[in-house]
Image (cartoon, grey):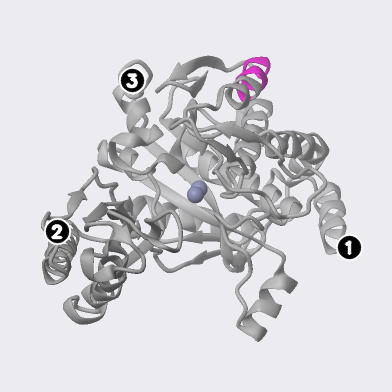
C-alpha cells in the first residue's frame, strides 16, 4: 500500500524536487518495467549455468541489449559480454553483473526453482542453482540498461555494461574477471573511468543499499593437504599408520592457528570444508585429503597462516609416524575488494540524496570474497555496493530469535524480489547519472 501511494504521489507531482528524502526520478518507469523483468528473472533462475558455461544466459542478455541499441560483443573471457552505449562526450562508466550460478541443489520451494543438473568442468554431474543472487544482478542490470536508453537525454558519456562469467570459480587466475581482463577488456573496449557493481546481501532489509569505503571483501585461498599413512585391516591398526586419526588431529590442531597464533585485530577465517578418506568401516585407508579455505585481509597475514598450516600438517604427520610428508598444494590467491574511498563517498552521497539516508547505509566489511577486486587492481576507481534482499519481517524475526536467515550460497537463498530488484535498478541509475553528469 505504501509503495502504490508513493507511486501515485510521484506521478502527480511529475519531476519531484531532489531533496534529502526525494524519490529517484526513475521510480515510475521501474515500476512499469517490473512485470517483464520478473519474467526474465524467473527464466534465468530456472535455467542456471555454472562458471564458463553461461552460454544461454549470455545469449539471453546479449539479445536484449542489442534490441535496446547497445553495441554487444559476446565470448569475452570465454562466455562474458561487453555492451557499449555511446551517448556523447563524457566519462565511461562500467556496470558489472556476474553471469554464473553455483553447484547447489535448490531447496527454496519457489515455483520457478531450478531442477537443473550439469556436468561441471571436472566431468562430475552436479545440481545447479542461482544461490548467490546473480540472477537478480543480471535482471537489475538489464532494467538499468533500458532506463538509461529511455532517458539518454539526461546523461552524456559511454555506458559499458559487462556480464562477467565465473565469479564463483575463485579469485585470481581461475575467475571470470581475470579471464575478461586477459582477453582485453580494457584494451579492446574503452577503459572505464569508474567501475560499479552491486551484490545482494542477507544482513539488510530488502532494498536497503549498503556501502563500505576501503577494504570490503576478503582475499581467499583454498589449499589442499593430502596426508599419507599406511592402510590395512581395521582389526589390526597396530600394523598401519592411520591417516584418518592423523587427519582428525590435524583438523583440531589447525583450529589453533586462528585462536592462538593470530592477532585478533587481523581478520582470519580458516575453514576445512572437505575431508575425504576411506571406503568402508573395516579398512584403514592409505591417505586422507583435506580441502581448506583461508580468508584474510593482507598478504602478510595470509603468508603467516599458510606457513602455520604447512608446519602443523607436517608435524602431525611426523607425530603419527608417517613415512611420507603430506602433499600441500597452494593455488593462486584471490584479492581483497577495495572500494575506492572517494568514489564510495560520492556514490553514497548521491544514493542518500535520491533515496533517503535510511535507504543507503554504511555497512561492515565481510569475510566473503569477490573477484570484483580485479577491476580496482587494474587501476580504476571501483565500488562494489551491497543491497539487502531479505523480507524485513523475516529479518526482524531472525534478530529476535538468533536463528540466521538463509544467506547467499545457501540452498534456501531467495531474494525478496520486488523491493530488492526495484531498489537495485534505482540505485544503479542514481549512481550512473551522478557519475555521468558529475553532480
Ligand atoms: Zn557467491
Ligand atoms: Zn555472488
Residue at which label 1 appears: 1
Residue 66, magenta (yes or no): yes
Tell me which corner region of the image, top left, top right, bottom left or bottom right, holds residue 268. Answer: bottom left
Residue 183: mark: 3
**10 Å crowding of disc 2: few (<14), some (14-19), many (20+):** few
Tell me if residue 173 comes above or below residue 291 in the rendering: above
How packed mark 3 is, by other alpha carbons closer than 10 Å (few <14, some 14-19, many 20 or more), is some
Q: Position of residue 107 (x, y in %)?
A: 70, 54
Residue lying at 57% horizontally and 44% vertically, measured from the top left: 428
* Magenta extent: 61-68
Q: Position of residue 373 (x, y in %)?
A: 33, 45
- In this view, 418 is above or below 134: below
Q: Residue at x 40, y 54 (%)?
A: 344
In the picture provided, is 293 more to the left or to the right than 413?
Answer: left
Secondary element under disc 3, as helix, strand or loop, is loop
Residue ID at (22%, 65%)? 239
Secondary structure under badge 1?
loop
Amino acid at each position: 500500500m505504501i509503495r502504490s501511494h508513493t507511486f501515485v504521489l510521484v506521478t502527480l507531482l511529475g519531476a519531484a524536487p531532489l531533496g534529502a528524502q526525494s524519490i529517484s526520478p526513475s521510480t515510475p518507469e521501474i515500476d512499469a518495467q517490473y512485470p517483464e523483468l520478473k519474467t526474465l528473472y524467473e527464466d534465468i533462475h530456472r535455467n542456471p549455468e555454472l562458471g564458463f558455461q553461461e552460454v544461454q544466459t549470455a545469449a539471453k542478455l546479449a539479445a536484449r541489449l542489442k534490441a535496446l541499441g547497445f553495441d554487444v560483443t559476446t565470448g569475452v573471457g570465454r562466455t562474458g559480454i561487453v555492451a557499449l552505449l555511446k551517448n556523447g562526450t563524457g566519462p565511461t562508466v562500467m556496470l558489472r553483473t556476474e553471469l554464473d550460478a553455483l553447484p547447489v541443489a535448490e531447496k527454496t520451494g519457489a515455483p520457478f526453482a531450478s531442477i537443473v543438473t550439469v556436468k561441471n568442468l571436472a566431468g562430475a554431474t552436479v545440481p545447479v542453482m542461482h544461490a548467490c543472487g546473480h540472477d537478480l544482478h543480471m535482471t537489475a542490470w538489464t532494467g538499468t540498461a533500458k532506463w538509461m536508453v529511455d532517458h539518454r537525454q539526461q546523461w552524456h558519456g559511454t555506458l559499458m555494461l559487462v556480464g562477467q562469467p565465473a565469479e564463483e570459480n575463485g579469485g585470481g587466475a581461475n575467475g571470470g574477471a581475470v579471464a575478461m581482463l586477459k582477453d582485453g577488456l580494457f584494451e579492446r573496449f574503452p577503459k572505464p573511468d569508474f567501475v560499479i557493481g552491486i551484490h545482494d546481501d542477507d544482513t539488510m532489509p530488502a532494498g536497503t543499499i549498503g556501502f563500505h569505503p576501503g577494504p570490503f571483501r576478503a582475499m581467499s585461498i583454498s589449499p589442499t593437504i593430502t596426508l599419507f599413512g599406511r592402510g590395512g585391516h581395521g582389526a589390526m591398526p597396530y600394523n598401519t599408520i592411520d591417516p584418518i586419526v592423523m587427519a582428525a588431529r590435524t583438523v583440531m590442531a589447525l583450529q589453533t592457528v586462528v585462536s592462538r597464533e593470530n592477532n585478533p585485530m587481523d581478520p582470519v577465517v580458516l575453514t576445512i570444508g572437505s575431508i575425504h578418506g576411506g571406503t568402508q568401516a573395516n579398512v584403514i585407508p592409505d591417505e586422507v585429503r583435506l580441502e581448506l579455505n583461508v580468508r584474510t585481509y593482507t598478504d602478510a597475514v595470509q603468508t603467516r597462516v599458510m606457513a602455520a598450516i604447512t608446519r602443523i600438517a607436517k608435524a602431525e604427520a611426523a607425530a603419527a609416524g608417517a613415512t611420507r610428508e603430506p602433499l600441500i598444494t597452494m593455488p593462486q590467491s584471490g584479492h581483497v575488494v577495495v572500494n575506492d574511498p572517494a568514489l564510495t563517498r560520492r556514490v553514497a552521497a548521491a544514493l542518500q540524496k535520491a533515496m533517503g539516508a535510511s535507504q543507503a547505509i554504511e555497512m561492515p566489511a565481510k569475510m566473503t570474497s569477490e573477484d570484483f577486486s580485479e577491476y580496482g587492481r587494474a587501476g580504476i576507481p571501483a565500488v562494489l555496493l551491497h543491497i539487502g534482499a531479505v523480507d524485513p519481517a523475516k529479518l526482524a524475526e531472525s534478530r529476535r530469535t538468533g536463528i540466521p536467515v538463509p544467506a547467499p550460497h545457501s540452498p534456501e537463498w531467495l531474494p525478496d524480489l520486488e523491493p530488492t530488484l526495484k531498489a537495485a535498478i534505482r540505485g544503479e541509475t542514481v549512481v550512473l547519472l551522478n557519475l555521468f553528469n558529475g553532480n
